[in-house]
Image (spheres, helix red, strand yellow):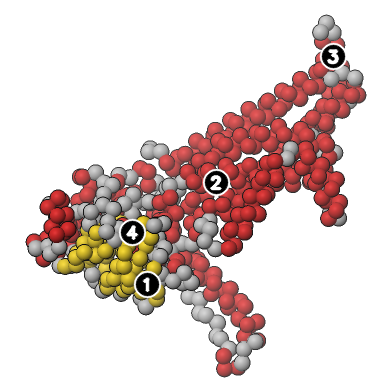
Amino acid sequence: MGNFDVKVQRFIDIFIGKQAYLQVLEGLQNTLTIAIIGLIIGIIIGTLIAVVRIVPKYKLLPRVLNVICNIYVETFRGTPIVVQLLIFYYVLLPLLGIRMTGLEVSMLVFGLNSGAYISEIMRSGILSVDGGQMEAGRAVGLSFGTTMIKIVIPQAIKNILPTLGNEFIALIKETSVVSFVGATDLYLVFNRIGSSSYEFMVPYIVMAFIYIILVLIISAGIKLMERSLRKSDRRN
Amino acid sequence: MIDVINLEKHFGDKNVLDGISVKINKGDIVCIIGPSGSGKSTFLRCLNCMEDPTGGQIIFNGVDIADFSVDINVHRRKMGMVFQHFNLFNNKTVIENIMLAPVHIQTQELNKAKRKNLLLPITNLFKSADKKEAPVAITTTKAQIKADAKENAMNLLKRIGLEEKADVYPSTLSGGQKQRVAIVRSLAMNPDVILFDEPTSALDPEMVGEVLDLMKSLAEEGLTMIIVTHEMGFAKEVANRVLFIDEGKIMEEASPEEFFSNPKTARAKDFLSKVL
């Protein structure tokens, strides 16, 4: 550790002198894009699956859909995300003849993966909304779907917002594996900086700090959002 | 208006409703009373298929709504319901609660008419000359529907003296206020009949009066009401028919004067001696 200041100096030389910060910004942008797009796809898929699981199952169609959703959720929860990335990038998409960049594949796979987890979060959120809300909607003649969209799901999302925030944070951290399919994220950039200077200690410390700051900013944002959403159910 | 024929409801092996037949006419104020667990709430909830009946028929305005192939949503619009726990939409303000269903349903119908008119040239191609349809006249707009619903909702709120609460969320209202808003929410659909499921049971005693007063004024206007209640005084005063239900059967049906002064069955006598 005696030459720590030398290591810092070397890092600064590369980071600013050789303009590596531009790459870092690109990596940061990719990390955020994958996490945000992944979360959006995940919320859409998760909500659809959650609703399918909650629909009364008198008829054949909901039952078939339910089985499909079960298989989907178990598959994506039962395999590591790295494996899913590799399978999509090297097996599934080539077989289907679809060309996608590593970044696009990452967004897709993170979306599909978080959809499986969010479906369970969303289901518990929907179940946490008082059953009377659905009954009241149906009693004035709205359909199951309309009541779900206009009444139940908005309240469910409010209830699960902290958990959704956790999912977003988890997504941001998990994106550090997308270099497996050649997408440039924070990890890959700092790894490159490290290899070009033969010095990994400082770059990895800086990387860790960037992740921590990202997560802190996001949790602060979630808290703000939660507070403004809570307005409708607090006495003022 | 509602003709219930041999209505049955089982939960598993349990027979909650055991062949109920009753005819409800326009303008009737029917109070349903009975011991707890007798099936009176289930009966009410079966009337608008909130619980699907396992047997029998419910003929409402000439249609058997117990039939699964019927679009129940259309018929529920003409059959309001008021719940014990109010069930106002928590994520909507008071006025949005009242406007939501009328605006949504009328907008849906407007869009349907527009779609139909749009496709009419194509569908008419496949019809013989005498069967060709003329486009549906569209007389309203989305903004107009909203404005009308808002005006109607404000009038309803004025009626219950809560117009200054229009833009607050239901969580800030008292129980009695919530229930009155819930009642005008179902009124906003211009229903033919309103079903009340123990509307005052979850209220503090001092708030029961305001809700009952509103129900009384609706009764005087000739609205058809079916009320499950434990308020015997209210039943005596307002109802024109009393149904006494026990063990999933109608044990006794009479006018309130007759029922309360001179019950015929032993069960009704026993029940009344406990509650009066």
Q: Chain of mark 1?
A: B
Badge 2 local density, few (<14 within 10 Å), some, or many (20+)?
many
Q: Secondary structure at mark 4?
A: strand
Q: Is residue B56 rendered to the left or right of residue A55?
A: left
To which quarter of the image does residue A76 belong? top right
Where does label 2 land, which residue? A123
C-alpha gap between disc 1 and disc 4: 16 Å
Where does label 4 land, which residue? B16
C-alpha gap between disc 1 and disc 2: 35 Å
In the rendering, at what x and y percent does residue A31 appear?
A: 75, 36
C-alpha gap between disc 1 and disc 3: 84 Å
Where does label 3 land, which residue? A7
In the rendering, at what x and y percent does residue B194 appear?
A: 31, 64
Badge 4 local density, few (<14 within 10 Å), some, or many (20+)?
many
Q: Secondary structure at mark 2?
A: helix
Residue, far top: A2
Badge 3 local density, few (<14 within 10 Å), some, or many (20+)?
some
Q: Is residue A4 rendered to the left or right of residue B228?
A: right
The total number of labels drawn is: 4
Q: Chain of mark 4?
A: B
Q: Which one is in front in this view, the residue at disc 4 or the one at disc 3?
A: 4
Q: Residue at x 55, y 85 (%)?
A: B134
